[in-house]
Image: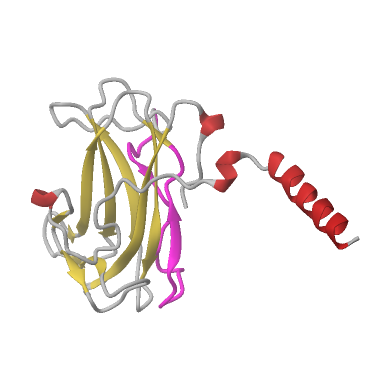
Amino acid sequence: MKHKILALLNALVCSLAIFIPSAALASAENILNDSGFETELKSAQGGWTLFDQSRFSSEHARNGRQSMFNWGFSRILPSPPFMLGTASGSFQQFAASPGSRWQLIGYAMTPDRLKGAPAYGIVQLSFFDDAGNDLGTVETAGTKIKARTSNQVNSETPAGEWVFLDTGIATAPANTSKVHAFTLYVDYSGKGQAQGVYFDDLKLCAHGADASADTACR
């Protein structure tokens, strides 16, 4: 009797497995190098290019000991241009072809609530041609913002909470030769104080042309 019960259980498990799509069981490969910023890998070694007010940080981390900190400040000026702002970030670039589909996910946190607006942190995907022209994405064609951006960490985000960010799928337009995966902090709030966002545990997934065959980017 015991053997019959075991056989029935095994048969049930096998029959259930038949109906579970393979995509649900798999996770897409992470193409980023040093995606958790633990080794402070620079662009010359295939890692991160940092710009404006950005640095590797050991102050906060979701996992491990390190994260990426993008920060800056914005203030109102008495004369033109009347507003001083910042767009600080980091990125990695990879070869890409027209029609290729990409997705960038990760986590971001601010230890103190951001003040003012616009002041926010995001992850972002952008496509470029061989001449360095920003081509936008198929999904954002005809809109004001060329890049495919994630949800934001902003003044409404609770302090100290690691928020999941997801760009969704970004499809490369004609003439694409490269994809750039960004962390980005933008501040044109005019609040006159330094503030920023920490990023950690990023993942860049390259999806095939067939959406039905996508594996999970998680």
Q: State the quadrant of the N terminus.
A: bottom right
**Residue 169 x %, y %:** 45, 38
Q: How is the image coloured?
A: secondary structure
Q: Is residue 84 magenta?
A: no
Q: Residue at x 37, y 24 (%)?
A: 99
Residue 98 found in image quarter: top left
Q: Residue at x 76, y 43 (%)?
A: 15
Q: Is residue 165 magenta?
A: yes
Dominant secondary structure (helix, strand or loop) of the stretch shown in magenta:
loop
- Residue 185 visible in the snapshot: yes
Viewer-nearest residue: 85 or 88: 88
- Residue 118 visible in the snapshot: no
Residue that extends furthest to the left in the rendered view of this protein: 44
Say above or below: 125 vs 112. above
Say above or below: 159 vs 36. below
Q: How many marks?
A: 0
Query: Position of 77 compared to 143: left or right?
Result: left
Residue that extends furthest to the top in the rendered view of this protein: 174
Q: Residue at x 35, y 78 (%)?
A: 111
Viewer-nearest residue: 196 or 200: 200
Say above or below: 8 vs 62. above
Residue 129 found in image quarter: top left
Say above or below: 70 vs 170. below
**Residue 40 x %, y %:** 17, 63
**Residue 56 x %, y %:** 19, 67
**Residue 41 x %, y %:** 16, 58
Span of residues in magenta: 142-169
Query: Position of 24 compared to 145: left or right?
Result: right
